[in-house]
Image (spheres, helix red, strand yellow):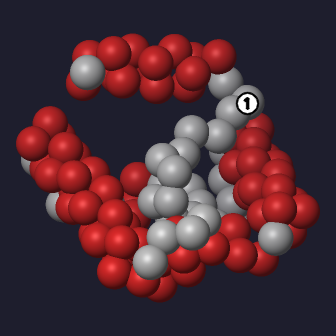
């Protein structure tokens, strides 16, 4: 599973112009629990599911990369999607433009 995931992620990155995310990785625990509750789960089911997914993800990253997750310096941006799809998309596009500008000019200015 690890090698397949690695292949898929590397392939997607090589194609470029995409966003690679892990479902729910950028949300605080309470936000994920709220979303699970809205999906029909009880409070205890939602909390248990979120904690299990986060714990499993952290263990995977630790096992294969020896990094404590979340390792924020690996990301250009983390977006709390509760700002809405349009605002999140605009934010992501603005950061992509800024990163591209830095690559073209070779600096921040």
User: Could one spot residue 45 in this view of the protein?
Assistant: yes
- 97 and 22: which one is in front? 22
Give coordinates of residue 33: x percent, y percent. 47, 77
Q: x, y percentage for residue 32?
A: 50, 72
Kindly identify the residue that appears in the image at 22 percent across and 46 percent down.
Answer: 61
Which image quarter holds the N terminus?
top left
Residue 43 vertical position relative to residue 98 in the rendered view, above or below:
below
- State the residue at coordinates (46%, 59%): 25
Q: Residue at x 65, y 40 (%)?
A: 19
SS at badge 1: loop
The vertical placement of 53 against 16, above or below, is below
Estimate how packed mark 1 is, as few (under 14), some (14 to 19) or many (20 or more) residues with alpha carbons within 10 Å: few
Relative placement, left or right, of 89 versus 25 is right
The residue that disc 1 covers is 17
Q: Where 79 falls versus 9 (above or below)?
A: below
Q: Nearer the viewer, residue 53 or 2?
A: 53
């Amino acid at each position: 599973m690890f090698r397949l995931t690695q292949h898929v992620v590397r392939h997607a990155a090589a194609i470029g112009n995409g966003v690679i995310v892990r479902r729910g990785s950028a949300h605080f625990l309470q936000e994920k629990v709220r979303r699970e509750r809205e999906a029909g789960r009880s409070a205890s089911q939602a909390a248990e599911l979120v904690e299990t997914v986060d714990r499993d993800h952290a263990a995977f990253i630790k096992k294969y990369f020896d990094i404590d997750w979340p390792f924020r310096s690996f990301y250009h941006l983390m977006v709390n999607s509760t700002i809405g799809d349009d605002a999140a998309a605009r934010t992501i596009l603005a950061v992509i433009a800024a990163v591209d500008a830095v690559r073209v000019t070779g600096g921040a200015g």
